[in-house]
Amino acid sequence: MTHSARPLDGLRVIELGQLLAGPFTTTILGYFGAEVIKVEPPGGDPIRGWREVRDGTSLWYRSLGRNKKSVTLDLKSPRGRELALRLLDDADVLVENFRPGAMEAWGMGPDVVRQRNPRLIYTRISGYGQNGPYSDKPGYASVTEGFGGFRYINGEPGKPPVRPNISLGDTLSAIHAALGVALAVIQRHRDDSGQTIDVALYESVFNLMEGMVPEFDGAGVVREPAGTTITGIVPTNTYTCRDGKHVIIGGNGDSIFRRLMTVAGRPDMAENPAMAQNPGRIVHQAEIDAALSDWCQRHAAAEVIAQLEAARVPVGPIYSVADMLADPHYQARGLFERVEIDGKPLKIPAIMPRLENTPGRTEWPGGSIGSHNEEILQGLLSLSEEDLAGLRAEGVIT
């Protein structure tokens, strides 16, 4: 089978670090063509053992570790760091997510590495960034989602903030880091030099906060949690239907609102001048939501969706992963890729965005710890079989 070219073909990326933010960055880069060499400790990335595990490796890692060449090196040992530096000598990009100062303590900070390889794009991901008074604080995604403003607005008024059941801060940071790498690669084509990319988890979350800063600075308004609604836009909410299922309705456009309320049997609201535009609908939000809630409770979710879609009103269900896998639109858009692990099939998600001429792809799922030691250490660093045997005996590699 012949494959189309990908935008990052020929780019060599070294991944140092573990768990999610750094590794998902390189998953994105590898999906779009980069050669990713994942440097793991001899025991492997801990995420290999997280959540649902099959045949000794988590199903999550099969997705996260796709298209990566796994090399084991103990970076706490001088020999391991020496070999990692040699890998960086011929690399285009480094992605690391250790705590700030760790790479410098190992003699692998940007100043040292860039003396050896001035074109290297040195990508750093941490909780609070590489400088500032909080840079030394431990920064898991859960904590930085609160510090970055997301948790404050997420949940019901008067109740404790709610955490979504994903590591949102890590994934956001990975997307920001991958964007940073793409921008730095473009710049390197202009001046042939590398640079450092500093991604903080809390800043990636902060980047989602829309107009909150100017609203507070200019009007003294602090946006508060709003449950299933969004402050200042009406109507957009989640409603319970007769069969107990929920639908999301976005009827906040002026003409959309008129169509929505007409279908819902409230032409009086549809034609009410006081509700014709969003500022007026904000005043009447409780009344509008009550009318829509009453209508939805008298119909099954499928009926609500069918009627509103016929009237060109944005509406949709709330999907679980089981619903996604069963949905024909997900299937038609190619959101699931099939891989095999020791002959057993497994579906993993495609990686966005979708490029027309140079799409990304999965070439292989995440493999075993150190599965590319010989290919990389012998092929790139010219180590001998005796060298590898010595490294295994010292515990530097698996």
Image (tube, rainbow, N blue to C red):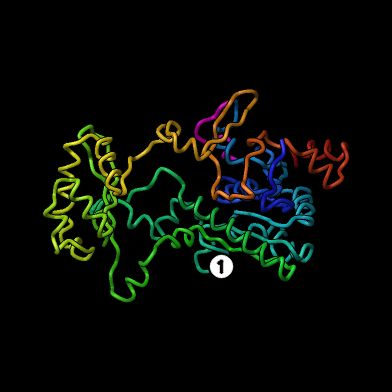
Q: Residues within 10 Å of mark 1 (few under 14, many from 20)?
A: few
Q: Horizontally, is 47 left or right of 222 in the view?
A: right
Which picture quadrant has residue 377? top right
Who is closer to the viewer here, 175 or 55? 175
Q: Secondary structure at mark 1?
A: loop
Q: Horizontally, is 365 left or right of 229 in the view?
A: right
| Quarter of the image that includes the C terminus | top right
| Quarter of the image that includes the N terminus | top right
Residue 294 vertical position relative to residue 267 in the rendered view, above or below: above
Question: Residue at position x 74%, y 64% from top?
Answer: 119
Question: The magenta stretch spans which residues?
Answer: 46-54
Residue 341 vertical position relative to residue 138 in the rendered view, above or below: above
Who is closer to the viewer here, 276 or 13? 276
Residue 53 vertical position relative to residue 226 in the rendered view, above or below: above
Who is closer to the viewer here, 179 or 337? 337
Question: Residue at position x 73%, y 44% from top?
Answer: 73
Q: Tell whether position 53 is magenta.
A: yes
In this figure, which residue is indicated by the disc labeled 1? 131
Q: Position of residue 24 (x, y in %)?
A: 57, 47
Count of labels shown? 1
Q: Residue furthest front?
A: 310
Q: Position of residue 25 (x, y in %)?
A: 59, 51
Q: Residue furthest bottom?
A: 218
Residue 232 vertical position relative to residue 311 in the rendered view, above or below: below
Q: Position of residue 171 (x, y in %)?
A: 51, 50
Could you tell me the amino acid type at mark 1? Asn
Q: Position of residue 123 (x, y in %)?
A: 63, 59
Who is closer to the viewer here, 250 or 157? 250
Question: Residue at position x 60%, y 54% from top?
Answer: 98
